[in-house]
Amino acid sequence: MTARRTLGGTGTPNPADDPTFRRALQRQADVLAPTVTLTAQTGELSPTARRERQEQVASAWLYLSCVAAWAEDHQLVEPLLRTGPPGVVRNAASAPLWLGRAFEALTRHPATQWLLHPGYNPMLWAGTPSAAACHTLIEWWAVEAPSLAWADRAGYPRSISGWVIGDLLQILSPERRARHALVQTPHYVADFILDRTLHPAANTFRDEPVLRLIDPTAGTGNYLIRAVDYLWQWYTTGRVEPRSVKQPPTTGGQAHRPQEAIRRILAGVDGIDIDPLTAAVARLRMTVYLGHLMADAGLLPRPLRLAAIPAWVTPRIAVGDSLLIGKISRAEYGRLHPHLVDLPGAAFPLADFTWPDNPTTPALSRTSARHV
């Protein structure tokens, strides 16, 4: 991890919880937005609509820069924002291209390729901030911005789990909060619910080879990440400790080698979210966190690199309306969600969903949930 200034005084190590950092992000958004040149596809917009579109484009660029900085702080990718390659001079004229290179580095794994796809992140392609504004953003990350990595703290999510980039998507995308009710679940709430559900499931189905769970409104993956922690402990030790509820640990499971534990986690954990970018962020977070667990077990080298995580480490996190998939016809689904019905990679890494001839199956039946 890169040693950089950290922000304190909030009671948590997460910079997204710090008002000082949030205000600094807003200043960067305010610098970017007025300079955005919108693409020709935006058509004729009223002055108010144009400003709103510029703000959305600025937020998209700013958010991906946060993801790139988080990845650099954890050495998942080569540094391009925090510092440039040795001997290369970064100048203002090339700043948008430089940001683009940093964004592209996030897509080096099959599961993370969708972060830049126009169908998942359309505002990224709806306009471009000026070179000067991009240069200001890069210099802020290089000189002033705090680290997005923090030391492990008992009871708090590890920074490698991407908690901060999940929080920042909510903070920087108010329209996403309004459309999709994107609200980050606190880790202690996720732990409480998992203590009340996953523990009894492990006790009841301890002889099953895989414990299966699905989050039908996965968001950026908070529940999925915490479930991975529980299941990693269960599959590697045959025991899982509660985190939030005072109860005895669940025991009696079979201990497996680390690689087999990862395969069982991937086989049993599914998620779905209606917002493509949110689902793409969840895919990134879970892929990286599984890679981190593999590196801790000696299966991957340190420092962990995104491109070095095996392609088979690909979580099943789909894009879709979990209340409707498998319950209505494709035509009706297309009328309700025209931007989703033909979205590339919506069911990645599974085969395309086959719409039922007689759409009467429950929306979250085992079949539909596994092939969304």
Image (cartoon, rainbow, N blue to C red):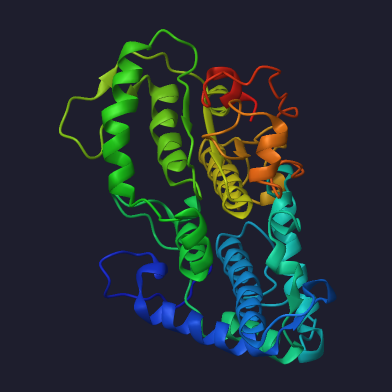
At a point 22% along the width and 40% down the height, the residue shown is 244
Please name whichever residue, 257 or 347, is drawn nearer the observer in this view of the structure.
347
Residue at the far right in the pictured view: 40
Identify the residue at horizontal 65%, vertical 82% (top origin).
138
In which quadrant of the rendered image does the C terminus lie? top right
Q: In this rendering, is residue 334 above or below 170?
A: above
Q: Is residue 348 visible?
A: no
Q: How many marks?
A: 0
Tell me which corner region of the image, top left, top right, bottom left or bottom right, holds residue 333. top right
Residue 66 image position (x, y, % from top left) = 57, 69
Q: Nearer the viewer, residue 303 or 188?
A: 188
Report the front residue among 332 and 349: 332
Task: Tell me where residue 164 appears, x and y as whole percent.
Answer: 46, 61
**Whole-percent x, y for residue 349 in the image:** 71, 33
Q: Position of residue 25 (x, y in %)?
A: 50, 80
Left or right: 236, with 39 as reference point:
left
Picture quadrant where residue 41 is located: bottom right
Asked whether residue 309 appears in the rendered view, the answer is: yes
Q: Residue at x 69, y 54 (%)?
A: 120
